[in-house]
Image (cartoon, rainbow, N blue to C red):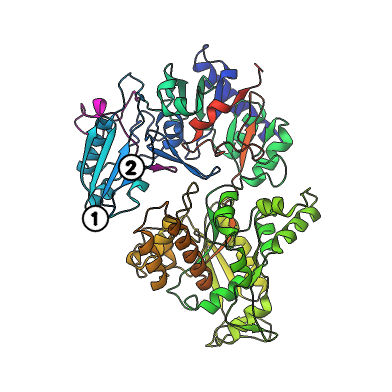
């Protein structure tokens, strides 16, 4: 008790001193306060976010200082034209791409943003290895030039219908930087860009030399930015990005109304609700979580390791999971189940889950039950999840469409009897105690390499999967490791909690981002480093190769692209190289003491995360409460 009180006093005093140091002209009621998710800034004086080694974009740089060419909104399911006036323009064989710039945009020092900035930026990126996207542009860009002050043309070395993906901001992209500043430096890689010049609606006001906080002030000429042109004036005069350290500090400070927006664990959020009557989540009531996050979580098998190279084994392990109990273990039921290798967000339910519903219901495995082909899909899982929540004392609606949005639109049947058949026909057997043995008679032991953070969805997947498979009679060992990326990317594992598929765009139905990392061209054998999440499964398939290659030959807005995406998802289900389980349950804590009209589930006008680059598009809609 004394220790908790001491932590509270230290935390509040720390904030009080720091906020007063910002100056008497910084009123709290005009300041939006956020926390970064990447931690304390390691190089406080460096604002050059255009290098490959820069590590602190969410200190406000990507949220309020910079505008990209395009930006993803995963809630509305759209790509926002920011500094670009329209989408990319390709020639017929995708060897040329043209970008039209939005006119009337200015850097914060009064210099207009033109095609000269883009051409200089691309050429500089190509020249210096330390610049972000150096490798990508050297691989594809033959020449870049302007045809007028607002038009940039790329001549590509080879066809690429997705070249524009390098410029779409989804927590990272190539972002334009000012030619008139960088051309005066000897080395753009070591240049610290301090003071920075903004293309976004805020400019740097001050920052902490120790890296704990960065303060931004709204530009006087905010209307000369894409944010101002599209959405109007950002309401907060100031944005303060403050690192408070561990989660308990964030809970305490928000309870004292000195932190407006933060990201928490599920348990931390529930603790916050008990402390602060002004705090809320993305959803006003249970399950509270962000159900629109464009990532899906689950289990990844190493398909180059026996017995996970056998499809029947992978499917047996899938059918040995009771998804309602699984999510109950992981998040007390507060995460939407996802049967596809794309997240079960409202927009992806519209794009892929609903169109594939009939196919899922009729999909069969190569095994019979009671003389009939077995259909593994279970649309009733949604209702079972709702019943679980009711039994836990939570209020949930009765409408099936609301339940699908809340809990996901179904999953696979809990069918341990069918899982047993699949294993028996591959030579597996049980010992006298019901434990599973491999075909050679040795005990089947599964080691799951798990994420080290107990609050991370990957970690929760590992614990839930282990319990389900133990119930089925398999000896499971969970190894948490801070080296999970090196272990899995080199292929030195059996089962891991890496994402079952790379994240899609979220704001566009194109699935090249999801499927292309499974292409055999990026396959690496065990012992060689896989450079993307998909190849960690070491699974390839010539049918998927063909789907990806056909996808890359057409415009991403071509209706055939959606059809190819569905074919790719079907193949992943049939082969089950990885198991998607539930969508990423993002947890945000918003304090409504000073600000309201956050983009919650009841009014999702934009994506809800404060650390994403779209924050600037949220700020014109925030409403002050009038409290001082």
Question: Relative to 20, does residue 619 appear above or below in the rendering?
Answer: below
Residue count near mark 1 (Cα–Cα under 10 Å), binned few <14, some 14–19, many ≥20: some
Residue 490 at x, y = what percent?
A: 38, 64
Q: Examine the image and state in which quarter residue 470 appears.
A: bottom right
In this rendering, position of residue 350 left or right of residue 116: right
392 displayed left or right of 178: right
Q: Is residue 418 above or below residue 342?
A: below
**Magenta-colored stretch includes residue 270:** no
List x then y, in percent, for residue 446: 55, 72
Measured from the top left, where is residue 118 in percent x and y?
A: 27, 35
Residue 215 is marked as: none
Residue 232 shows in the view = yes
Q: What residue is shown at x 68% (from left), y 51% (from top)? A: 406
Label 1 or label 2, whichever comes before in sequence order:
2
Residue 556 in picture, x, y percent from top left: 40, 52
Name, please, the residue furthest toward the top: 24
Q: Which residue is mark 1?
A: 158
What range of the chain is rendered magenta?
Answer: 168-197
Which is closer to the viewer, label 1 or label 2? 1
State the residue at coordinates (66%, 39%).
Answer: 281
Examine the rendered structure and indicate whether residue 147 appears above or below residue 339: above
Question: Residue drawn at (52%, 15%), measured in percent from left and top?
Answer: 26
- Give the residue displayed 61% in from the left and 48% down from the top: 291
Is-magenta flag for residue 184?
yes
Q: Quadrant of the N terminus?
A: top right
- Between 608 and 265, the one lying in front of the other is 608
Which residue has dot 2 on it?
53
């Amino acid at each position: 008790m004394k220790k908790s009180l001491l932590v509270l006093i230290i935390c509040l005093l720390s904030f009080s001193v720091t906020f007063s140091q910002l100056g008497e002209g910084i009123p709290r009621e005009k300041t939006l306060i956020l926390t970064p998710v990447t931690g304390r800034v390691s190089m406080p004086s460096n604002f050059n976010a255009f290098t490959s080694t820069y590590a602190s974009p969410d200190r406000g740089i990507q949220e309020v200082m910079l505008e990209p060419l395009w930006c993803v909104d995963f809630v509305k399911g759209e790509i926002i034209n920011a500094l670009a006036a329209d989408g990319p323009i390709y020639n017929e064989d995708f060897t040329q791409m043209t970008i039209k710039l939005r006119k009337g945009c200015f850097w914060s020092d009064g210099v207009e943003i033109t095609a000269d900035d883009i051409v200089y930026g691309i050429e500089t990126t190509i020249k210096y290895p330390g610049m972000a996207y150096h490798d990508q542009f050297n691989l594809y860009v033959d020449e870049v030039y302007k045809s007028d002050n607002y038009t940039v043309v790329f001549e590509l070395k080879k066809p690429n219908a997705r070249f524009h993906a390098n410029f779409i901001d989804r927590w990272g992209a190539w972002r334009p930087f000012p030619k008139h500043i960088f051309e005066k430096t000897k080395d753009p890689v070591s240049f610290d860009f301090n003071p920075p010049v903004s293309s976004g609606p805020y400019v740097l006001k001050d920052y902490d030399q120790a890296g704990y906080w960065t303060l931004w002030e709204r530009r006087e000429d905010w209307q000369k930015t894409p944010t101002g042109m599209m959405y109007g004036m950002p309401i907060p005069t100031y944005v303060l990005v403050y690192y408070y350290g561990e989660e308990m500090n964030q809970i305490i400070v928000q309870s004292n109304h000195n932190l407006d927006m933060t990201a928490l664990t599920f348990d931390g959020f529930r603790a916050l609700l008990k402390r602060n009557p002004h705090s809320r989540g993305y959803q006003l009531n249970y399950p509270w979580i962000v159900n629109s996050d464009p990532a899906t979580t689950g289990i990844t098998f190493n398909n180059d390791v026996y017995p996970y190279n056998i499809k029947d084994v992978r499917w047996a392990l899938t059918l040995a999971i009771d998804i309602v109990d699984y999510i109950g273990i992981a998040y007390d039921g507060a995460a939407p189940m996802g049967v596809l290798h794309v997240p079960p967000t409202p927009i992806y339910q519209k794009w892929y889950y609903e169109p594939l519903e009939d196919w899922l219901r009729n999909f069969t495995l190569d095994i019979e039950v009671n003389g009939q082909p077995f259909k593994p899909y279970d649309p009733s899982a949604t209702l079972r999840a709702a019943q679980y929540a009711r039994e836990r004392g939570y209020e949930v609606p009765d409408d099936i469409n609301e339940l699908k949005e809340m809990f996901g639109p179904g999953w696979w049947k809990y069918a341990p009897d069918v899982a047993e058949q699949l294993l028996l026909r591959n030579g597996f057997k049980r010992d006298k105690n019901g434990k599973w043995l491999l075909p050679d008679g040795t005990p089947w032991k599964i080691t799951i390499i798990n994420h080290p953070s107990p609050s991370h969805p990957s970690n929760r997947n590992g614990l839930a999967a282990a319990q389900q498979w133990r119930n089925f009679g398999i000896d499971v060992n969970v190894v948490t490791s801070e080296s999970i990326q090196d272990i899995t990317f080199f292929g030195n594992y059996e089962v891991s909690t890496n994402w079952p598929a790379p994240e899609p765009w979220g704001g566009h139905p194109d699935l090249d981002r999801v499927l292309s990392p499974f292409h055999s061209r990026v396959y690496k054998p065990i012992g060689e480093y896989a450079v993307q999440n998909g190849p960690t499964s070491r699974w390839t398939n010539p049918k998927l190769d063909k789907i990806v290659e056909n996808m890359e030959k057409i415009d991403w807005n071509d209706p055939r692209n959606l059809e190819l995406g569905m074919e790719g998802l079907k193949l992943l289900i049939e082969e089950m190289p990885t198991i998607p389980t539930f969508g990423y349950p993002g947890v945000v804590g918003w304090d409504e003491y000073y600000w309201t009209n956050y983009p919650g589930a009841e009014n999702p006008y934009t994506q809800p995360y404060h650390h994403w680059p779209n924050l600037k598009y949220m700020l014109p809609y925030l409403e002050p409460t009038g409290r001082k």
